Image (spheres, rainbow, N blue to C red):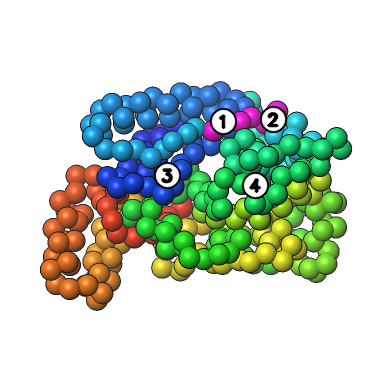
Amino acid sequence: QEDGRERRLGRQWKTKQPSNYDVYVSIDVTYSCGKRTLRRMRQALKNENSGNLKKEKVWILQIHTYDEATMVEEFPKLHAARIRLPRGRLDIPGKREDRSMAWGFHSEALALWHLKHNAVDSSSSSNGAYRSSPGDNRYRYVWVIEEDVGVTGDIRPLLNAYASEDRDFIASELLPITATWYFYPVALDEFVKKAEGKQLRANTREHVQRFSSRIIHRMVTWSKEGAIAWSEETPAMICLVEGLSYLELYEDHLGDPYRWDGHVTKEDFHNRMKVDFESAQNSYRQCHDKEECERMMDEGFEDNSRNSIDGSWIGKFYHPLRF
C-alpha cells in the first residue's frame, strides 16, 4: 500500500520489555508496488532504529518476501483457481500490471512463509508430497494480521489474552456460505470433494487470525494436493473437515468497524483510541486498587507522546484503516 503503514507497523511492536513474539512482515514483491513497499519498509525500520527510538527495542525481526511465480511453482493448481474467478484476473484489485494472486489466496502465501521460516523439515518426496509434520514447526502458533488492521492499545497483551487457548484456528464469524457468495465458484474440485462430507461450506473474516501448527500443516497439504479455494474459505473448511478446534475472537476485542468494507480515517482512529483507553481505565478501576489505578492514569493517553500505541492496556482491532 502506498501510505505510512510501515511506520505504524513498527510503532505497534515497540516495547521496553522483552517480547515473546517473533515478528515477520510478509511482502509480495511480484510487481512494482510490492518492491516499493519493500524499499520503504527497510528504510522505515532503519529510521526507527537510528532515530528517535534509538534507545528502545523494535521487535520487527524479519522481512519475508515472495512472489506469484513462487506461489505457482509450489502450488501449480493456483492458475486453475484464478480462472474460476467470475471476472478472472480483473477480480483482483490493482493496476493492470499489479494484480497478484496473493491478494485472494492467502493460505498459499502463508504456506510459503511456513516452508521458509517455520517448518524445520519441509522437504518433499519424489512425488511432491509434503513430508513435514506439525511437530516439526518452530512456532506452535502463528498470528496473521493484515496490514490495514488498526490496534488501539498494546498489541502484545491483546494477543496474550489467547495464550491459554489451545485452539487450532482463531478468527471471527465462521459462518455457512451458499452459492450466492461471490467467490464460491473459485473452489477447485479437489477442495469441493474434501468438503462434501460436511454438507456445507463456510468462511470467516480474515483480517486477524491465529493458526496452530496442525492447521498450517494441513493448509500446506491441501494446497499441494490442489484443494484450493478463496482465502476466506480455505482455513474455515480445513478446520471443519479435519475436525480441528475453533475459537471466535473475543467480542470485546473487536472494534466497529471490523469488516472488509469498513472505513477508518486517521481522525476516526485517534478518537477510537481515546474511547477505548477510557474504557480500559474503567475496567482497570474495577479490578485494581486506587494507587495502581492512579498510576495507570498518570501514564496514560493524555501524557503519552506516542498516543499510547505502545502502552500496557488492551484495546481493540479495527479494519480497515484508510491512512
x%, y% of residue 107? 66, 46
Residue 39 position, x and y percent, is: 46, 23
Circle 3: is it few (<14), some (14-19), or many (20+) Cα within 10 Å? some
Task: Mark 3 or mark 4: name the one nearer the start of the chain.
Answer: 4
Nearer the camera: disc 3 or disc 2: 2
Q: Residues within 10 Å of mark 2 (few under 14, many from 20)?
A: few
Q: Are marks 2 and 1 in contact (CB under 8 Å)?
A: no
Q: Is residue 67 magenta?
A: yes
User: CA separation, marks 3 and 1?
Assistant: 24 Å
Q: Kindly identify the amino acid type of the residue bearing the numbered disc 2.
A: Thr
Q: In what element is the residue under mark 3?
A: loop
182 sits to left or right of 208: right
Q: Label 4's element?
A: helix
Query: Type of residue at label 3?
Result: Arg
Q: Given the image, on which type of amino acid does mark 1 rest?
A: Thr
Q: Residue at x 41, y 38 (%)?
A: 60
**Point 46% across, 42% down: residue:** 23
Residue 136 circle label: 4
Stretch of the chain drawn in magenta? 64-70
Depth check: 285 or 230 in front?
Answer: 285
Lower sequence index among marks 4 and 1: 1
* Disc on res. 65: 1
Q: What type is the residue that disc 4 sits on?
A: Asp
**Residue at the disc numbered 2:** 70
Query: Which residue position holds label 3?
Result: 322
Q: Tell me where residue 237 appears, x and y as whole percent.
A: 71, 60
